[in-house]
Image: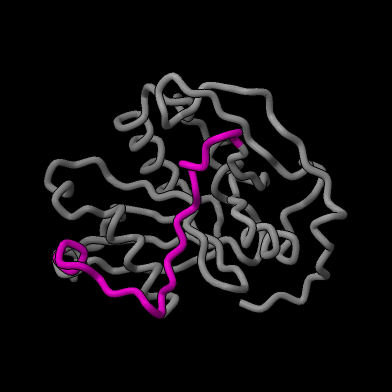
Amino acid sequence: MSSNAPRRPVRDLRFFLTVPHACSYLPGKEATTLFLDPQESPVPGVYDSLSLLGFRRSGRHLYRPHCEGCNACRSVRIPVDEFSANRTQRKVWQRNHDIETRVIAARFDANHYALYADYIRQRHADGDMYPPSREQYRTFLTLEEPYAHLMEMYLEGELVAVAAFDQLEHGLSAIYTFFKVDEALDKRSLGTFAILKLIALCQ
């Protein structure tokens, strides 16, 4: 997606660094995060430039890990022209041949929120996203920008997963995926399938 938004040089933007806090991924480690001034709106031109420098989006905030002596938390980039699914990924793709997907603008939908809230309660009750709320969901996943999208996934007419992603100038950026927590669906690996579908959209 090309953007007509004016591009501000990165050097003209203001950034802040958090105080050290407990790392979410490495036990016993501290982390710091570099984030764009919250007064700056993540408009396409700014977002495109910063994403190439490893920044990701959470709601209206653009951030990246900035930990001294550690670079374990790096964004994964997939050159889609070179991507070839491995045996496990091909099985996931085939297993979900009956999943219907629809891409829509990132807007609030009560069915999406119900699925999200149940997912957080069942999978992340010990995390900082619990308890879920409508306001939290709106702030996190329904940004009204032209690049923000949701991919709905349906099985026999039932909504079973939603993947939030951004369409940037150089590719897609996966934001978050949530799905129906059901033992019968576990074998489908819907999170992996969502990434494979986003790769297919790029190709």
Q: Is residue 197 left or right of residue 60?
A: left
- Figure quadrant of the N terminus: bottom right
Nearer-the-camera pick, 124 or 32: 32
Judge whether residue 163 can be spotted in this image.
yes
The stretch drawn in magenta includes residue 71: yes
For the view shown, which residue lies furthest in the right direction?
A: 12
In the image, taking residue 58 as reference, residue 5 lies left or right, namely right
**Residue lying at 60% horizontally and 33% vertically, measured from the top left:** 68
Name the residue nearer the viewer: 181 or 198: 198
Q: Where is residue 104? Give x, y as percent.
A: 49, 66
- Residue 61 in magenta? no
Residue lying at the far front in this picture: please name it.
Answer: 69
Magenta stretch: dominant secondary structure: loop
Colouring convention used in this rendered image of the protein: one colour
Count numbered badges in the picture.
Answer: 0
| Image: 68 above or below 84 | above
Q: In this view, does 18 lie above or below 95?
A: above
Q: Does the image show residue 98?
A: no
Q: Residue at x 32, y 66 (%)?
A: 196
Give the x, y percent position of residue 203: 41, 80
Q: Identify whether 157 is placed above or below 40.
A: below
- Residue interval drawn in magenta: 67-91
Q: Which one is nearer the viewer's eye here, 34 or 157?
A: 34
